[in-house]
Amino acid sequence: MKFSQSLIAIITLALVITFGNAYDPSPLQDFCVAVKSLNNGVFVNGKFCKDPKQAKADDFFFSGLNKAGNTNNDVKSNVTTVNVDQIPGLNTMGISLVRIDYAPYGQNPPHTHPRATEILVLIEGTLYVGFVSSNQDNNRLFAKILHPGDVFVFPIGMIHFQVNIGKIPAVAFAGLSSQNAGVITIANTVFGSKPPINPEILSQAFQLDANVVKDLEVKFASKK
Ligand SMILES: *[C@@H]1O[C@H](CO)[C@@H](O)[C@H](O)[C@H]1NC(C)=O
């Protein structure tokens, strides 16, 4: 190999190592169970960590994902989250889990996870799912109909949704590549900000009548 080629190889390797670790870094120890106060703790990745010797099985345990969330709401779906807030042992692990219940014709409305890719498996029912790629990729819609056992991936940052197109409730589970994936629900975020964004701004942005925007802002102001 010529000198210039080996230099390029070394630089490429260095870039892979650097950017490969850009998020979800190695925990650097077996575990780092999150604790709320700095009692026998050290501060790592935004949380205090328990002294590893004090860690116990319950720090890595959650019970209740067999139970359906209550879908009696406007979008007829419910996400039960199992992240670092429910399992302190997930701290620094770069992974978490959700259960999603959908009433017949319910939906998990368009949203994005700022910190995670999502891999979803459908257990019961029929879902129409999709994500939209970025402006650079011409906002292409990638969509599929899922049946039980089918798996679909929503890449990090992409706006995505799931709709129950069946007559029976649907149940899915999804893994997320962050201990705290975050959720930005598009409609709630844009129309339900506190304080509201000036309706004229949204009217121009979404090419909607200002009164429609005002209605939407009133509707979403009351939502969490
Ligand atoms: C989801 O279900 C849980 C458990 O039934 C309930 O406490 C919660 O209010 C529900 N969330 C929504 C948004 O309906």
Image (cartoon, rainbow, N blue to C red):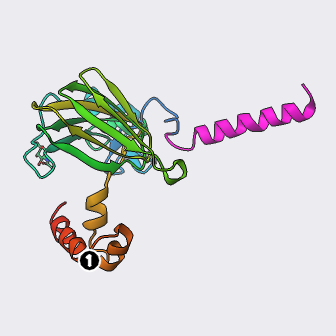
In the image: residue 13, left or right of residue 166: right
Q: Is 183 drawn above or below residue 205 in the view shown?
A: above
Asked whether 6 falls inside the magenta stretch, the response is yes
Q: Where on the picture, by quarter, is residue 12?
A: top right
Q: In the image, what residue occupies the spot 25% across and 27% down? A: 122
Residue 223 visible in the displayed image: yes
Q: In the image, what residue occupies the spot 31% across and 23% down? A: 150
Q: In the image, what residue occupies the spot 23% across and 44% down? A: 108
Residue pointed to by mark 1: 210
In the image: residue 63, left or right of residue 48: left
Q: Position of residue 221 (x, y in %)?
A: 19, 68
Q: Position of residue 140 (x, y in %)?
A: 45, 45
Asked whether 35 falls inside the magenta stretch, the response is no
Give the magenta range: 1-24
Residue 62 visible in the displayed image: no
Q: Where on the picture, by quarter, is residue 164?
A: top left
How many numbered discs sit on the rendered protein? 1
Q: Farthest right residue?
A: 2
Ligand 1 neighbours mark 1 (CB distance < 8 Å): no
Q: Nearer the viewer, residue 222 or 134?
A: 134
